[in-house]
Image (spheres, rainbow, N blue to C red):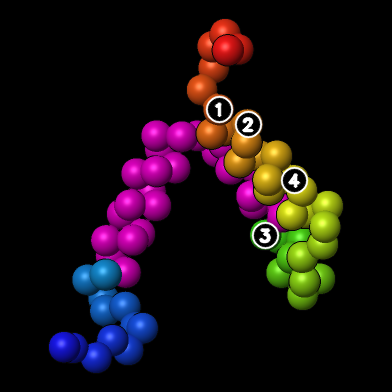
Amino acid sequence: MTEQTGQIGSDGWQRLIAACEMYTRSTGVHYDEVLDQVAQRAQSEGSIGKADIGALLLFNACVSTPPGPAR
């Protein structure tokens, strides 16, 4: 069994950066707008509130539900 240190090597960072850039190109800048706003607010305030958690849950429900007729 190998010990995991929780550190990412330089190759791992390069792969993460490339994946992030590819994701941004494929989804557009407005797709994660709610996530970005909540993250900025949580970072500046040092905590996350109920309204932010609700916004994330609603966002997740909206993007997880495929468009089409209701069943």
Secondary structure type for disc 1: loop
The N terminus, quarter of image? bottom left
Q: Residues within 10 Å of mark 1 (few under 14, many from 20)?
A: few
How far across and down, in percent of the image, does residue 70 sit? 60, 12
Q: Which residue is mark 4?
A: 55
* 69 lies above or below 58: above
Task: Identify the amino acid type marked 1.
Answer: Thr
Asked if labels 2 and 4 touch by Cβ distance under 8 angstroms, the answer is no
Q: Which residue is mark 3?
A: 39
- Mark 1–mark 2 Cα distance, whole angstroms, equals 6 Å
Q: Residues within 10 Å of mark 3 (few under 14, many from 20)?
A: some
Q: How many marks?
A: 4
Secondary structure type for disc 3: helix
Q: Residue at x 82, y 62 (%)?
A: 49
Q: Residue at x 18, y 88 (%)?
A: 2
The label number, if any, that marks residue 65 in the structure image? 1
- Mark 4–mark 1 Cα distance, whole angstroms, equals 16 Å
Compare marks 3 and 2 and give the one earlier in the sequence. Answer: 3
First to last magenta residue range: 13-38
Task: Identify the amino acid type marked 4.
Answer: Ala
Compare marks 4 and 3 and give the one earlier in the sequence. Answer: 3
Q: Which residue is mark 2?
A: 62
Task: Identify the amino acid type marked 2.
Answer: Cys
Task: Identify the amino acid type marked 3.
Answer: Ala
Q: Residues within 10 Å of mark 4 (few under 14, many from 20)?
A: some
Which one is closest to the eye, mark 1 or mark 3? Answer: 1
How far across and down, in percent of the image, does residue 33 sit? 64, 42
Secondary structure type for disc 2: helix
Secondary structure type for disc 4: helix
Compare marks 4 and 2 and give the one earlier in the sequence. Answer: 4
Q: Residue at x 71, y 69 (%)?
A: 43
